[in-house]
Amino acid sequence: MPRAYFISGVGTDVGKSVVCAGLLKNIANAQAIKIIQTGASLSDQNLYAEACPRHQTGTLRHFKLAASPHLAARVENQAIDIPLLAREIQQETRKAEWTLLEGTGGILTPLSASETFLDLMIALDYPVILVVGNVLGAINHALLSLEVLKKAGLKLEGLIFTHPDPRYREDHPIAVDNMRSISALGQAEALGVVPHLPELSRDTRASTAWAEVGASLSRAADRLLAPGRSADPPAEAVSGAEAVSGAEAISGFDQRHLWHPYCPAPGSCEPNWAVARTAGNYIYLQDGRKLLDGMSSWWCAIHGYGRPEILAALNTQAQKMAHVMFGGLTHEPAAALGQSLLKLLPPGLETIFLADSGSVAVEVALKMAVQYWQGGGRPNKTRFISHYGGYHGDTLGAMSVSDPVNGMHAGFKGFVPEQLFVPRPAAPFASPFDESSLQALAEAAARHHEQCAAVIIEPVVQGAGGMWIYHPDYLKGAKDICRRHDLLLICDEIATGFGRTGKMFASEWAGLSPDILCLGKALTGGTMTLAAAVCTREVAEGISRDKRPLMHGPTFMANPLACRAALASLELLRASPWMERVRALQDALETGLAECRNQAQVHDVRVLGAIGVVEMKQPVNAARLRKYFAEKHEVWIRPFNRLLYVMPPYALAPGETARLCLAIRKAIEDEEWV
């Protein structure tokens, strides 16, 4: 397998190019690539060629202005697309057994308005060699860089010290102490020391100088070339009574002992693939395969995996306070998250209940509705109107308002409370709206409003109940019906919230604010479990008449770690061009899935925002398809019922979206869905 290493530095002008060239001189079958060059000439590429004329070298992005890459690109009316650049780098690494990837500036050098070089490093997940210019101030710069790499979860191969300033030669007391202090405090090994060589500063460099550079880095090269050494970090063993490691051992234990979603007892389902790690838009399996994630880990990892901003926030918070009970206490992460949410929520939604999961958020919303009417002297309003085809979660109350016939919970009839159901909204999203589609809801509300507390609905998109995308005007009509008949409107945005449909919340397509809004999934960017039930001040005060408490209080309510992760995720979302990314995803999905409409087996193709759905006329063979997608196309797509669908991370490159669409098209053409 080809191996690749980042040659990154603590800043600019520390000698990254010299280090790349020196390592090249020791590795016969290697290439060096300058990822981004800013400035008038391709000087680093020329430097590689001068030191190692027989080696393959290149530069992937070149901008004329000698400035930070985001500025240099902007001056030329260009932008650096990290997913696209990462894909290009992966293709380049296949051209040689060894690839040295020279970084640009320091680790946190900005590549765009919201992303740094670190984001590219995380997306590729290659080990790092950190180049330290051994000068005054090196300790601070190096330790900060090492801390950033550690928090990002990147593997550090070691340090290489250079001496760009003639005042601080190898034997200078400051240089000696720098090496000792950085290695000890940063817990990092020094792989090599490049001496100060005046010849390397001249226009015509002496071959003897390059030979000396090569000799100084021979030990570092030997470390990289050691037999059996892998550029990928080894999988860690699982500690416990029965420690397991490796794909077969993990899957074997899993088959014997672990339940999985919607499966019979352990051992009764198809074996599950063992995951070693995740990074960027990819899932890395224990057996070495790498799958492009088309599901965002059940729609929650909207930024992709391993975002350093979220991981750093988690690490900082964990060292202060991982958890504290919310009963009688409060804390800054919860307050800060609440403030952040209020800036995004539809108007009128003011009071926030931070719950454990999406299902719990629905439970709390149902309790809010019932207790609101109790506070108003109408205790008989305890039932709910919901829609066929809907899905709201797996806990008892959430099950009761999910599809009672064809849904996952049909087998619990007689155990869950019986609610009232009306047909799903009939008008497709892009078709003219038919007012008659509201008739069933209007009739149910008129007939049963004295016993019903609220209407609960998934706005615009019914998710797990069938990925049905319907007209926003149905929501407007539902809100009017609720107002006429003294019913609250609960919008379940657990799947659609935070940009998935192209709006921050799907309710915005109808221009309305519900009485209660349920949030979850993408709230923490796919890192922690957290959800929220948010209601208007009127609902909150109605519940609390005579100081009655809202009867719910999870142990991990407002968990500080989860709140901090959510806060970082929301800040990341606001700072990113998420609307443009989702719009681009929608265009790519519409283009990539359009051909499926011509297949006789296909019933419908639906796309909205970062959601692409192909509905077959017959149920699909989900187990066969998962295997086909992973083995033939190296993508992770999890079909169900009659649906082949994707809900990927927002920052997918066009080529990655095309891969997902191609996999679905080929599965239909090759009849792998049967």
Image: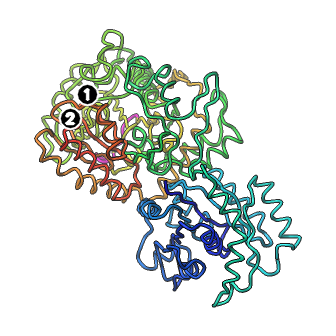
Q: Is residue 482 visible?
A: no
Q: Earlier in the sequence, mark 2 or mark 1?
A: 1
Residue 25, position as x, y percentages in the image: 62, 72
Amino acid bearing label 2: Pro
**Quarter of the view holding residue 460:** top left
**For the point 65% across and 71% down, which residue is it?**
19
Helix, strand or loop for disc 2: loop
**For the point 49% across and 66% down, which residue is it?**
112
Residue 649, position as x, y percentages in the image: 40, 49
Residue 271, position as x, y percentages in the image: 41, 28
**Residue range (magenta):** 508-516
**For the point 57% across and 48% down, which residue is it?**
310
Left or right, 311 with respect to 389, comes to right
Q: Which residue is disc 2 drawn over?
A: 425
Q: Is residue 411 or residue 426 the one in the foreground?
A: 411
Left or right, 184 with respect to 347, comes to right
Amino acid bearing label 1: His
Which residue extends farthest bottom?
A: 203
Helix, strand or loop for disc 1: strand
Tell me if mark 2 has few (under 14), some (14-19) or many (20+) residues whose alpha carbon lies within 10 angstroms of its own: many
**Quarter of the view holding residue 644:** top left
Which residue extends farthest right?
A: 173
**For the point 64% across and 54% down, which residue is it?**
226
Q: Which residue is disc 1 drawn over?
A: 387
Q: Check the image and report above or below for 171 versus 279.
A: below
Q: Is residue 434 visible?
A: yes
Q: Check the image and report above or below for 224 versus 257.
A: below
Specify whether residue 203 is painted magenta.
no
Residue 320, position as x, y percentages in the image: 71, 41
- Kindly check if marks 2 and 1 are in contact, taking CB atoms under 8 A apart as contact: yes
Q: Quadrant of the C terminus?
A: top left
